[in-house]
Amino acid sequence: MSASNSKSDKPFNTKIFSSFSLQYAIYFVFLLLVIGITIKEPAFLSIENFRNILSMSATRIIIAMGVGGILITGGTDLSAGRQVGLAAVLSASLLQALDYPRRMYVDLPQLPLWLPIILAMVVCALIGLVNGLIVAKLKVPPFIATLGTMVAVYGLNSLYFDRPPYGAQPIGGLDKRFTNLGSGYIGLDGTYSLPYIVLIAVLVALFVWILHNKTTFGKNIYAIGGNPEAAKVSGVNVVRNLLIVYTLAGALYGLGGALEAARTGGATNNYGNGYELDAIAACVVGGVSTSGGIGTVPGMVVGVLIFSVINYGLTFINMSPYWQQIVKGAIIIAAVAIDIRKYLNKR
């Protein structure tokens, strides 16, 4: 009896081990990278470095929250980066210091800090709504729909950026209230203080987590991603929910773009270039399925942090930027391969 039991236990344990390995393989790779970086440069493990990594990750987390929601529905958004750039240029142009000699709007009075940020969010939300209408109403594949809006938004942003009197000059001289939002800290002790921008990212992630896990809307988007036809038969208004997903994503890109301008202290029309690919990659690495219907907010956050640690850590040890791209590409391919393997195993 015991011999037969031991034989039956073996494949069961092997199956558990295989499932566990697939689930956490990418985290093991990440851990090995961190260990390798630390061995080469022990100074990497410092509070200051981790605070810098969190600051770098903050806007990417906000953007990933928007992209992740769309991926969960089985879609994608290639226009995210260009919307971030538009939001950065728009908010920066309206929040330049009054004494800066090269202001875009010379006679513009000092505006409340929140107003240009909200305006950037509204503009990007409208672009997101257009994306949603094209995908949900016109039935254009999300890849093609958002590819078109990506090109159009970049053109629109370039026209705005190139306007007189200075035309195509980097927007600088930002209001100190604005730059403090991107680089200031909360807390009395400088060593353990938390950047404002990180706190905002945490609040946004918490909001999206509640939306995904505690509301009917959240259940609906997972249902749409799992099987849109079955969701429709079950009474889910697929069109309305897709419109909300894309509009909300646009608003998050707008917030992320404004905060990115505040963090870096300026903006150009090329801001946000490639951010959509970074966000998609981070979401996939964090467990969001490219097939739709699967993904969590903590996973998205972890995915962003993984790439931020890789970028910062490999730069910290003076690795060539070209090798960094190779490492990132390999991790993306591995993450997608693991995702597909999980899907096939479930079948």
Image (spheres, helix red, strand yellow):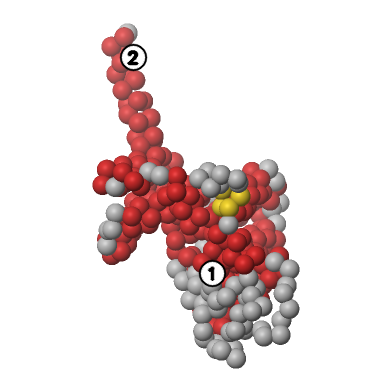
Q: Is residue 229 left or right of residue 340?
A: right
Residue 63: image quadrant is bottom right
Vertical position of residue 142 compared to residue 194: above or below: below
| Residue 100 percent location from the top left of the image | 61, 80
Q: Is residue 166 visible?
A: yes
Q: Is residue 85 above or below residue 238?
A: below
At horizontal 60% and vertical 91% (from top left) the residue drawn is 165
Q: Is the Cβ of the residue at disc 2 closer than 8 Å to that at disc 1?
A: no
Picture coordinates of residue 77, whole percent (x, y): 53, 65
Which residue in the protein does label 1 denote?
265
Q: Residue at x 59, y 72 (%)?
A: 174
Seen at 31% across and 23% down, the residue is: 10
Q: Is residue 193 left or right of residue 214?
A: left
Residue 240 in percent (x, y) is at 70, 61
Q: How many marks?
A: 2
Crowding at dot 1, Cα within 10 Å, few <14 / some 14-19 / many 20+, comes out as many
Secondary element under disc 1, as helix, strand or loop, is loop
Q: Which residue is mark 2?
A: 5
Query: Measuring 62% from the left and 67% from the top, which residue is drawn there?
Result: 176
Viewer-nearest residue: 243 or 139: 243
* Three-letter code, disc 1: Gly
Q: Amino acid at mark 2?
A: Asn
In the visual, does 13 lie left or right of 159? left
